[in-house]
Amino acid sequence: MDNMFVQELDGRPLTMADMPRLMALQYGHFTAMQVRQRQVKGLRLHLERLAGSSRQLFGCQLPDRHIIDCLHQITMEQESCSLRVNIFTTAFGQPVIREKDLQVLVTKTPAVAPASQPIKVMSARFERLLPEIKYSGIVSGILAYRRKAMDAGFDDVLYVDQQQHISEGAIWNVGFYDGQSIVLPATPALPGIMVQLLSDSLWNNGVAVIHRNVPLSQLYEYKNAFYTNSVNHRGMIAQIDQHMFDHSNDTLSDILERAYETIPWDNL
């Protein structure tokens, strides 16, 4: 049976001798993807995310080829899986970090199916530091707010800024449908790979995608709300705080599904 949990460091199996250096994972960033038949959607965007975040955090970046080789290596025995790619360095105390100081940790876990049921979310004021980077310490800001939402009977948390403008979910982007167009919050948030892919595909399918502020007080303007991440391309949101959304028809779900199906798969 194929291994369902595997970690490789720079393309080789992780060993006990590597454990001390993994303490530096917090000084780094990552991207996550779903792999099917050794293919992934949005490979170029994942590589651009990793390169841009590395330049911002470290002042240098790894060659795309090295990262692709690591992905190719770890999927040789498991063609469909989930992958998390961490870029980090143990040289964070040095005045200058160079390409040779960066390492790639790839974690392979079982493939995950999209959620089938809509979720209820509770808003919370929270603004992430460096929202454009998927940095490794992001989880610390997620768990407390998510736990508070779950204790209140919700499934997850939805972040808003000090003006009560919606930004993003804990580990997902949020979008809205007004009956004609898809509306994405203009408030700073992590630009998820899935929402970027869907935005381009929606435009190509004749559906307008608009970026504007979405205040909590104006949710009544939208027929539906949805969320996206590496696993979900059409996750439905049934409720935000006390505001309920109507999901009696599949119009939005069908729009998102058509857009997703026209996004090409890239070979690893």
Image (tube, rainbow, N blue to C red):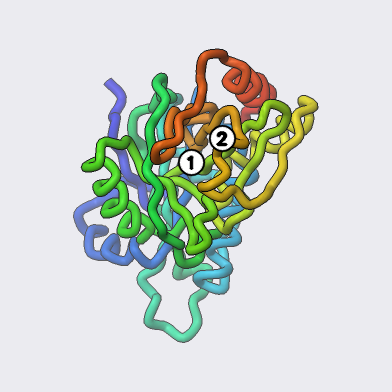
Q: Nearer the viewer, residue 116 or 161?
A: 161
| Within-10-Å neighbours for mark 2: few <14, some 14–19, many 20+ | some
Q: Nearer the viewer, residue 156 or 137?
A: 156
Q: Nearer the viewer, residue 21 or 234?
A: 234
Q: Residue at x 35, y 61 (%)?
A: 137
Q: Quadrant of the N terminus?
A: top left
Q: Image height check: is 236 above or below 139?
A: above
- Residue 34: x %, y % from top left: 47, 32
Q: Is residue 150 left or right of residue 57?
A: left
Residue identified by numbered label 1: 71
Q: Is residue 244 visible?
A: yes
Q: Residue at x 56, y 69 (%)?
A: 56
Give the residue type at disc 2: Leu
Q: Image height check: is 32 above or below 25?
A: above
User: In the rendered image, which quarter is residue 210 located in?
Assistant: top right
- Residue 159: x %, y % from top left: 44, 52
Residue identified by numbered label 2: 268
Q: Quadrant of the C terminus?
A: top right
Give the residue type at disc 1: Leu
Quote the CA–CA distance across marks 2 and 1.
7 Å
Q: Is residue 77 visible?
A: no
Res. 116 mark: none
Mark 2 touching mark 1, by CB under 8 A? yes
Label 2: element kind: loop
| Within-10-Å neighbours for mark 1: few <14, some 14–19, many 20+ | many
